[in-house]
Amino acid sequence: MKFSPLLDEMIKALQVLPGVGPKSAQRMAFQLLERERSRGVRLAQTLTRALTEIGHCSQCRTFTENEQCELCASPKRAENGLLCVVESPADVAAIEQTGHYSGRYFVLMGHLSPLDGIGPQELGLEILEQRLRAEQIEELILATNPTIEGDATAYYIAEMARAAGVKVSRIAHGVPVGGELELVDGTTLSHSLMGRQPLI
Amino acid sequence: MKFSPLLDEMIKALQVLPGVGPKSAQRMAFQLLERERSRGVRLAQTLTRALTEIGHCSQCRTFTENEQCELCASPKRAENGLLCVVESPADVAAIEQTGHYSGRYFVLMGHLSPLDGIGPQELGLEILEQRLRAEQIEELILATNPTIEGDATAYYIAEMARAAGVKVSRIAHGVPVGGELELVDGTTLSHSLMGRQPLI
């Protein structure tokens, strides 16, 4: 025991946060105790509320404290009949920030990873299949990460979409805009060659 | 607004922690929501309890939820009449870990820094002065950091101790054990020369 029992407990509890080890937890505890007591208490209240109230959107599975998230609740979003599959809510935020997409999303909350016990059910794919059959979806856009697991997940969902008779596409992989060819890895470069587009 | 209002609020609240910006706060929020709900709730409870219950030891000013910290409450610690002044509770932990000190501590919770409005009163120096006069203190050891502010604080307290007729010393500054001379900065090296000790 290095500090008082309660302070020790506080430092240990803070280590539940990702990337926080004993040293940073200690620094956080001291900072909160010395300078940020009221904001710290507010943090604790917000954490309690968020962790008990936030669940998943019944339509797209993203995090929300309501039954449906804002994007799914907006009828405007259904107009173009696009549905974009992503791995995490952060991906939704990233795509929203581009301003080039106005359809709906489906958030997998992960990717297929049989070794970790994450199968189609854990990703809510039965909800997606239901939506593919019940809704008027013009195109399913697969925007999972360009990793082995992300690709495998995309192919799995593509098969599902084909079976349901829905047109399916994958976002383009290639040389990042502003990047230099000689600095791009070989796999990305082959992808950019295979995915070449007619120019005129 | 990138996420649901409550999730946004959670991500913002997490940024009260030192070293946590928007990106890591988002990662923390997702991790807690996806995988660590129960431990997250426990973190919130511990935070609330710690931030409301932990105060300062009436004797040495370190963090404790009791009126006196464990070290001050132990009569064994008063036997050798040593009192060591440090800047923070982490310094107490560091010195305790050496196993070479068995006296008591006085924790300043900072150092003199007039520009930031931190004067003798903010460091509880009137409590220290009272102890210097009331208690049987054989030696006051100044273990503030070897920085400009730490040195200034040490000199200020040394004057106080002299006025109270208490012997006062400063921990040695010099080449770290295991370090190589050629890699040590000049100021440290001068300190180690000035503080040389007779060998036999």
Image: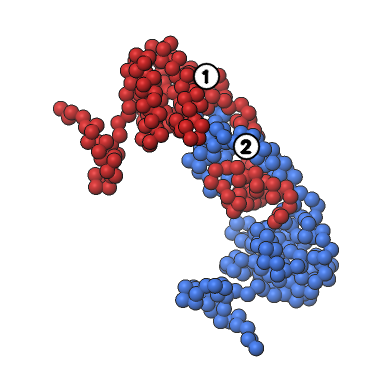
Chain colours: A blue, B red
Residue ranking furthest to the front: B115
Q: Secondary structure at mark 1?
A: loop
Q: Quadrant of the C terminus of chain A?
A: bottom right
- Please give the chain letter of the residue carrying mark 2: A
Q: Position of residue A59 (x, y in %)?
A: 79, 59
Residue at 65% of width from left, 44% of height from top?
B13
Query: Is residue B31 depicted above or below B112 in this figure?
Result: below
Q: Is residue B86 visible?
A: yes
Front residue of B84/A148: it is B84
Residue at 36% of width from left, 16% of height from top?
B163
Residue at 59% of width from left, 53% of height from top?
B23
Between the residue at mark 2 and the residue at mark 1, the CA separation in whole angstroms equals 23 Å
Q: Position of residue B169 (x, y in %)?
A: 32, 24
- Please give the chain letter of the residue carrying mark 1: B
**Residue A116, located in which quarter of the rendered image?**
bottom right
Q: Which residue position holds label 2?
A: A40
Q: Identify the amino acid type marked 1.
A: Ser
Residue at 49% of width from left, 77% of height from top?
A181
**Which numbered marker is on residue B58?**
1
Q: Position of residue A11 (x, y in %)?
A: 54, 36
Q: Identify the amino acid type marked 2.
A: Gly
Query: Is residue B137 depicted above or below A139 in this figure?
Result: above
C-beta proximity under 8 Å, tags 2 and 1: no
**Which numbered marker is on residue B94?**
none
Front residue of B129/A122: it is B129
**Residue A163, located in which quarter of the rendered image?**
bottom right
Q: Is residue A35 left or right of residue B158?
A: right
Q: Is residue A156 left or right of residue A163?
A: left
